[in-house]
Image: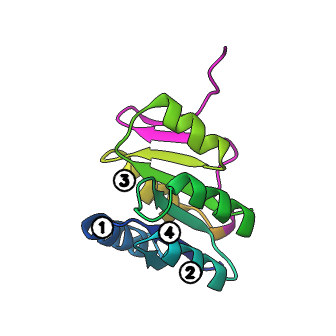
């Protein structure tokens, strides 16, 4: 089984430390960054990245901009957005930028932990985009105009 390399990007220490512990307990090797600049340096240095968990508000760069860079650098990586903003337009923007899983804090940590624990490194990216929120895990469906 290959190593699950995960990048955590959150400028709030308590959130970053929580996600680091969660990912480590799920059997992942964790690299963390507190800014977009640190994340860009880290993602460039990592030859293989299984997943990245990105907060949308990281100070020096938009989390959405970082998603685009991550997707370009690591096309097979599972990109997870973690935010408190449960807003459809933000979800749509995140998914259009390459997000695979949209996690609404503080919900879904157990579901994310199970996914990371029970899935091999090359299977972390879901077949369909997912939302994890107070309603559990469900498929993201594009809104009809």
Q: Nearer the viewer, residue 66 or 7?
A: 66
Nearer mark to the viewer, of 4 and 1: 4
Does residue 12 appear anywhere in the picture?
A: yes
Q: Is residue 122 above or below residue 5?
A: above
How packed mark 1 is, by other alpha carbons closer than 10 Å (few <14, some 14-19, many 20 or more), is: few
- Label 3, on which residue? 109
Structural distance between the alpha carbons of marks 2 and 3? 24 Å
Nearer mark to the viewer, of 4 and 3: 4
How packed mark 4 is, by other alpha carbons closer than 10 Å (few <14, some 14-19, many 20 or more), is: many
Whichever of callouts 2 and 3 sits on the residue coming sooner in the sequence is: 2
- Label 4, on which residue? 36
Label placed on residue 42: 2
Q: Quadrant of the C terminus?
A: top right
- Residue 91 shown in magenta: no
- Label 1, on which residue? 18
Residue at 42%, 59% (x, y): give it.
Answer: 113
Numbered disc 2: secondary structure: helix
Residue found farthest to the left? 14
User: Residue 31: where, in percent of width, then height?
Assistant: 48, 79
User: Residue 34: where, in percent of width, then height?
Assistant: 40, 72
Residue at 55%, 48% (x, y): give it.
Answer: 101
Nearer mark to the viewer, of 4 and 2: 4
Q: Is residue 80 above or below residue 13?
A: above
User: Residue 87: where, in percent of width, then height?
Assistant: 43, 32
Structural distance between the alpha carbons of marks 1 and 2? 19 Å
User: Residue 14: where, in percent of width, then height?
Assistant: 25, 67
Structural distance between the alpha carbons of marks 4 and 1? 19 Å
Q: How many marks?
A: 4
Whichever of callouts 4 and 3 sits on the residue coming sooner in the sequence is: 4
Residue found farthest to the top? 145
Whichever of callouts 1 and 2 sits on the residue coming sooner in the sequence is: 1
Structural distance between the alpha carbons of marks 3 and 1? 10 Å
């Amino acid at each position: 089984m290959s190593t699950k390399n995960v990048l955590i990007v959150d400028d709030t220490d308590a959130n970053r430390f929580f996600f680091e512990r969660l990912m480590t307990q799920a059997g992942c090797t964790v690299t963390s960054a507190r800014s977009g600049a640190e994340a860009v340096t880290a993602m460039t240095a990592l030859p293989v990245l299984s997943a990245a968990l990105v907060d949308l508000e990281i100070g020096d760069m938009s989390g959405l901009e970082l998603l685009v860079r991550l997707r370009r650098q690591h096309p097979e990586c599972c990109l997870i957005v973690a935010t408190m903003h449960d807003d459809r337009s933000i979800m749509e923007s995140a998914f259009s930028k390459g997000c695979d899983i949209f996690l609404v804090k503080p919900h879904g940590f157990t579901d994310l932990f199970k996914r990371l624990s029970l899935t091999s490194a090359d299977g972390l990216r879901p077949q369909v985009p997912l939302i994890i929120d107070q309603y559990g895990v469900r498929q993201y469906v594009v809104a009809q105009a």
